[in-house]
Image: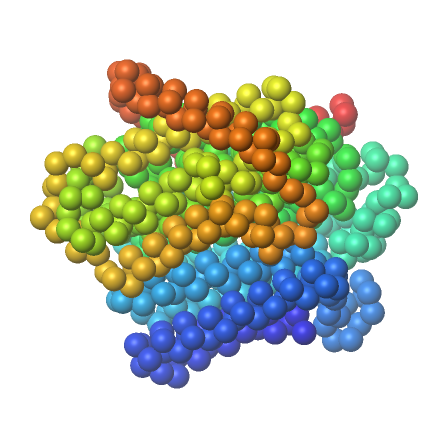
């Protein structure tokens, strides 16, 4: 029953209070490991049965609360299980209270419920629960800066989700339904004008949750809160923001072609290009990673809205891949910044020469970097191959530019590994290093066995062409060469970007104004379309 997948993390959270801190953590990790197996079993079942539905309370159809698992939702459940397992193992030696661990698993339960529910109002409730939990995790040690950033996160998300709530109310007024499938059936019979306002309200909140520009400030702020547990930033980037992508796919499926897909393609291109520019302009390694995530989300949005099967499959597969290499990068960056007592990339060097642990961390980070920049035979190269296979000249060029920017960002990031060692020995926690290394190895494994891994998650009948992949390898090699030349001879330009401090960093009022402005924009586009 699908309800168990929502309840299981809550039970893990509650059981933590019946044991001592160390024993409770071990039991929680064992239980979470079993939960990963259960999530993989659910994915296997959806491949065999297509759709699994549980009607809570034995109500029929849309009359009660229904949970639905198809391949898409099952993939996100698997991602949630794996990323939270990695975060739990990574945090086992940290001195976090039981409250931290309790909230961690409640967060997982809220996200899994979000992925399984097919009720518009339940999405609102679960999104709000996840928002409150993250805000408390950011603020729970009562540091003034963290309380401020946590309140900004909470208030801006509350403002954005109100647009979603108003959209849900309008949907219910028009259709008398809240179940997504039932709403889709009614909308198909209505004049388009009747659903424009609901669509604009819902998609404003969804684009905010996706962290697409210009609605990404909340995500960057929350991912870079000083002295916050690195596990929070990791889950935000690797999984939480993917909830927005999941909702985007679902709600687009309910409303159909209300708005031209070109709108989201343009939004993705702008987000991707500006994301890598702002990542390149940072010295703070967590800011670099956060803006890089924004850029990758833009790339995914381009693929999901091209209207071709290969690109759509590539966009979904890249969503999965991004979770693994970005989790490895955030975990690693947290360890590195803690060891060097700084997050300034210009003040960190020689990690490779800082003992055995330094070499292990360098290798682990390089594996994740190879994944995100699309080095051949790594997972990112496979998903980017699918995204670009049927793209036209213009979109292919846009994706190449975004990937070139990504290469430049991580050439800069990799400067920490070479040069004169600043530490005699990198004192990395062995458990933490193992987590980062395993995530890096998965980036390689999902690339070498690209077609198998694609079929493991998504049952798309698509193949990798030898000559097509060879062409993508050539494009990558040229891009890498251009990136190395720019890194060597374009340092004054990069330094100027750093001095200017280019970033889309808005306060509470600015974020609220941007949300309102975006709603007006999308409403105009919907009406004119």
Residue 77, given in percent of the width and then of the height, sits at 58, 60
Outermost residue toward the right?
Answer: 189
357 left or right of 124? Answer: left
Regarding residue 216, the answer to whether it shows in the image is no
Relative depth, front residue between 285 and 468: 468
Regarding residue 454, the answer to whether it shows in the image is yes
Outermost residue toward the front?
Answer: 466
* Residue pictured at 25% horizontal, 34% vertical: 415
Above/below status of 81 relative to 220: below
22 left or right of 440? Answer: left
* Residue pictured at 12% horizontal, 41% vertical: 422
* Residue pictured at 46% horizontal, 70% vertical: 33
Residue 346, given in percent of the width and then of the height, sits at 21, 32
* Residue pictured at 84% horizontal, 45% vertical: 187
Q: Quadrant of the N terminus?
A: bottom right
Residue 13, given in percent of the width and then of the height, sits at 45, 73
Q: Quadrant of the C terminus?
A: top right
The image quarter containing residue 398 is: top right
Outermost residue toward the bottom?
Answer: 18
Above/below status of 260 relative to 88: above
Residue 217, given in percent of the width and then of the height, sits at 45, 37
Relative depth, front residue between 69 and 161: 69
């Amino acid at each position: 029953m699908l309800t168990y997948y929502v309840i299981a993390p809550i039970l893990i959270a509650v059981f933590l209070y019946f044991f001592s801190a160390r024993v409770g953590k071990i039991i929680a990790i064992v239980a979470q490991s079993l939960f990963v197996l259960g999530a993989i079993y659910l994915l296997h079942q959806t491949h065999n049965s297509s759709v699994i539905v549980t009607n809570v309370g034995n109500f029929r159809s849309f009359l009660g609360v229904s949970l639905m698992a198809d391949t898409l939702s099952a993939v996100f459940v698997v991602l949630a299980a794996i990323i939270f397992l990695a975060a739990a193992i990574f945090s086992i030696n940290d001195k976090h209270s039981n409250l931290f661990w309790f909230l961690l698993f409640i967060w997982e339960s809220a996200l899994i419920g979000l992925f399984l529910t097919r009720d518009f109002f339940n999405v609102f409730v679960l999104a709000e629960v996840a928002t409150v939990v993250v805000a408390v995790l950011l603020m729970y040690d009562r540091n003034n800066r963290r309380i401020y950033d946590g309140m900004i996160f909470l208030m801006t998300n509350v403002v954005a989700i109100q647009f979603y709530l108003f959209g849900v109310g309008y949907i219910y007024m028009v259709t008398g339904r809240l179940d997504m499938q039932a709403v889709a059936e009614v909308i198909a019979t209505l004049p388009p004008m009747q659903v424009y306002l609901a669509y604009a309200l819902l998609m404003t909140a969804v684009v905010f949750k996706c962290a697409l520009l210009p609605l990404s400030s909340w995500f960057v702020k929350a991912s870079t809160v000083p002295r916050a547990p690195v596990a929070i930033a990791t889950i935000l980037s690797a999984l939480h923001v993917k909830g927005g992508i999941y909702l985007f796919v679902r709600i687009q499926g309910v409303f159909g072609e209300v708005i031209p897909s070109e709108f989201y393609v343009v939004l993705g291109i702008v987000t991707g290009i500006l994301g890598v520019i702002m990542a390149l302009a940072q010295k703070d390694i967590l800011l670099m990673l956060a803006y890089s995530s924004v850029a990758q989300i833009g790339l995914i949005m381009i693929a999901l809205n091209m209207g071709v099967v290969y690109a759509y499959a590539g966009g979904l597969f890249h969503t999965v891949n991004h979770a693994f290499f970005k989790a490895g990068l955030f975990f690693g960056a947290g360890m590195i910044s803690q060891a060097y007592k700084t997050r300034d990339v210009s003040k960190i060097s020689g990690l490779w020469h800082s003992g055995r642990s330094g070499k292990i961390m360098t290798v682990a980070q390089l594996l994740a970097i190879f994944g995100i920049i699309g080095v051949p035979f790594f997972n990112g190269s496979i998903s980017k191959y699918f995204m670009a296979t049927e793209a036209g000249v213009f979109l292919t060029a846009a994706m190449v530019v975004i990937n070139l920017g990504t290469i430049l960002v991580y050439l800069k990031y990799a400067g920490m590994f070479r040069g004169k060692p600043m530490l005699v020995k990198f004192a990395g926690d062995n458990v933490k290093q193992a987590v980062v290394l395993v995530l890096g190895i998965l980036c390689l494994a999902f690339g070498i066995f690209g077609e198998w891994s694609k079929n493991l998650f998504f049952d798309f009948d698509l193949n990798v062409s030898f000559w097509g992949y060879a062409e993508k390898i050539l494009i990558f090699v040229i891009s890498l060469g251009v990136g190395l030349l720019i890194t060597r001879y374009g340092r004054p330009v990069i330094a100027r970007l750093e001095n200017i401090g280019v970033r889309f960093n808005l306060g509470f009022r600015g974020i609220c104004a941007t949300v309102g402005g975006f709603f007006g924009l999308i409403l105009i586009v919907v009406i004119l379309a």
